[in-house]
Amino acid sequence: PKPALRAMTFPFVTERLSRNRVLAWGKAPKRGTVRIQRRSGGGWQTIRRVRAGGRNSPFAVRLTLSGPANLRAVSRSATSLTWHQGG
């Protein structure tokens, strides 16, 4: 499948609010926990968990994050596209 399909089924966006604050928001494809992850070394590290009330439930969370980072959201077996957040 093309990346556009993943972006439509699991939208996830980040926006830098200040030097050390980032807003992450999206729509969870399934009910349950959404893990916000940051690329670290050779893998991904969960930096925050957010509860999604149901299918296509919107979620939003403010993160304390300085410097550049690659972020993604994971909900069960679904993974969003990766967003690069400049520092």
Image (cartoon, helix red, strand yellow):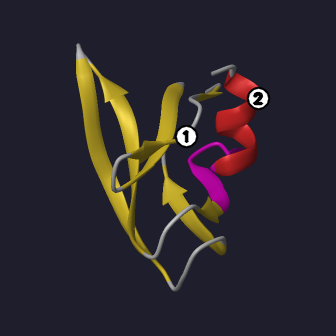
Q: Is residue 42 left or right of residue 78?
A: left
Residue at the (61%, 27%) spot, across then down: 87
Q: Is residue 21 left or right of residue 64?
A: right
Q: Specify the quadrant of the image occupied by residue 62.
A: bottom right
Is residue 17 visible in the rendered structure shown here?
Answer: no
Q: CA distance from mark 1 to mark 2?
A: 11 Å
Q: Note whether residue 84 is visible.
A: yes
Q: Is residue 75 or residue 21 the one in the foreground?
A: 75
- Residue 37 is covered by the magenta coloring: no
The answer to which of 27 and 39 lies nearer the viewer is 27
**Magenta stretch in the rendered image:** 10-26
Of residues 43 and 47, the one nearer the viewer is: 43
Q: Indicate left or right for 36 with 54 as reference.
A: left
**Judging from the image, what secondary structure is the residue with disc 2 in?**
helix
Identify the residue under disc 2: 4
Q: Which circle, 1 or 2, is nearer the viewer?
A: 2
Instruction: Look at the image and tell me in which quarter the N terminus lies.
Output: top right
Q: Residue at x 68, y 23 (%)?
A: 3
Looking at the rendered structure, the number of numbered marks drawn on it comes to: 2
Q: Amino acid under label 1?
A: Ser
- Magenta-drawn stretch, dominant element (helix, strand or loop): strand
Give the residue displayed 58% in from the left and 74% down from the top: 55
Secondary element under disc 1, as helix, strand or loop, is loop
Residue 10 place in picture, x, y as percent = 63, 50
Q: At x 33% / y 56%, what residue is drawn? A: 76
Amino acid type, residue under disc 2 in the picture: Ala
Label 1 close to label 2 by CB (< 8 Å): no
Label 1: how many Cα within 10 Å (few below 14, some 14–19, many 20+): many
Give the farthest residue toward the front. Answer: 1
Horizontal and vertical percent position of residue 34: 42, 63
Instruction: State the residue position of label 1.
Output: 80
